[in-house]
Image (tube, rainbow, N blue to C red):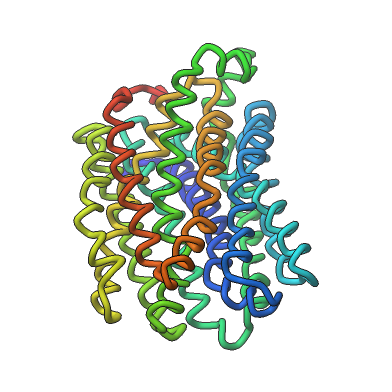
Amino acid sequence: MFNWTPTQRNVAFASFASWTLDAFDFFILVFVLSDLADNFHTSISDVSIAIMLTLAVRPVGALLFGRLAEKYGRRPILMVNIVLFSLFELLSAWSPTFAAFLAFRAIYGIAMGGVWGVASSLAMETIPDRSRGLMSGIFQAGYPCGYLLASIIFGLFYSMVGWRGMFLIGALPILLLPFVWFKVPESPVWLAARERKESVALLPIIRTHWKLCVFMVLLMACFNFFSHGTQDLYPTFLKVQHGFDPHTVSIIAISYNIAAMLGGVCFGLFSEKIGRKRAIIIASLLSLPVLPLWAFSSGSWAVGIGAFLMQFMVQGAWGVVPTYLTELVPANTRAVLPGFVYQLGNLLASVNATLQSKIAETHGGNYGLAMAIVAGTVAILICVLVAFGRETRGIEISGS
């Protein structure tokens, strides 16, 4: 990383920051589920439909903005994404009814769906090939970093601004635009492909590589159950089941998101040494012995330690995903196909929050049991699927 050029560092920062701020906007919602339920006179499981909608429409955004990025370049489409998800985060704060809130979250989800594929392709096509594992971990660490920012903002400002104020703060990512405009160039790989007039037709690629696409969608469904299954209802679990106050919830959330960032970078870097597959499998397996401490312990210290260890492993496995998907797909589909299969996996996993809340409600409000069932199951499935996948470490992308 220290040998990267200033331009490469700017691209790395912009890609990381865009995914961080996108995740920040998404995770604001998980901290105020109970407040929204009270405001709109409905149940937490009903409000969790907003999470499901946001996740369910993300494949639309990944396909739409990914195709535009293949045609017009990564940089301008990333800027459009930032404007749109900031705008609809702002509109969420002014929702007059629950139906309007759900509509705004759905449209926000379309904008959110485009960011991951566009930003990751911009980063992976710009940084040196030998640094992709590290960049993968750094980029994916933007997701828990966004969660961390939401945790800090919730702890500092929630009591003053309420749930509507939290969404108003969520419009701040638009401040990233000047940096992208002045400091971030277009992907050199995309520029070279444009000069060669390479075809960017998606359907022929999917038809030719349909087995790979099915594999990636199933893998990403498990990965999204893994992350959302351990994150989305965790603040509700801490507030409702354990009765922790907002300050304690914020401190625990801050600690496990720091762990998530560390895990993503460590296992992303680790994957350059032992391979992508082994790094993912090791991180996923190590989450299993942590489950009892994470979901069934009592007291803020024990719960906090369990959450720290769990997110280190979950996001450690996730830290390898951006480079693994980028290396798996054909060269002229990197802005659209990795993001598209990622978000299709999100679509399959979009029922997670509603599923877990229903399980909890039918077991006396036991959110810990609901989360443990999902997390343990998908950790094993990830190991099985990855074991049958191919290793990709060492594949050239940038040609540097």
Instruction: Give percent across and percent down for residue 2.
Output: 31, 46
Out of 395 and 225, give the one closest to the viewer.
225
Residue at 65% from the left image edge and 51% from the top image edge: 109
Out of 92 and 217, give the one closest to the viewer.
217
Q: Is residue 3 left or right of residue 96?
A: left
Q: Is residue 4 above or below residue 194?
A: below
Instruction: Give percent across and percent down for residue 275.
Output: 24, 32
Q: Quadrant of residue 235?
A: bottom left
Q: Quadrant of residue 336?
A: top right
Q: Is residue 360 left or right of residue 92?
A: left
From the image, which quarter does the N terminus lie in? top left
Instruction: Give percent across and percent down for residue 133.
Output: 32, 38
> Does any portion of residue 182 appear in the rendered image?
no
Residue at 47% from the left image edge and 59% from the top image edge: 356
Q: Is residue 307 left or right of residue 52?
A: left
Residue at 30% from the left image edge and 25% from the top image edge: 388
Instruction: Give percent across and percent down for residue 268.
Output: 30, 43
From the image, which quarter does the C terminus lie in? top left
Question: Total marks drawn?
Answer: 0
> Does any portion of residue 127 appear in the rendered image?
yes
Out of 362 and 198, give the one closest to the viewer.
362
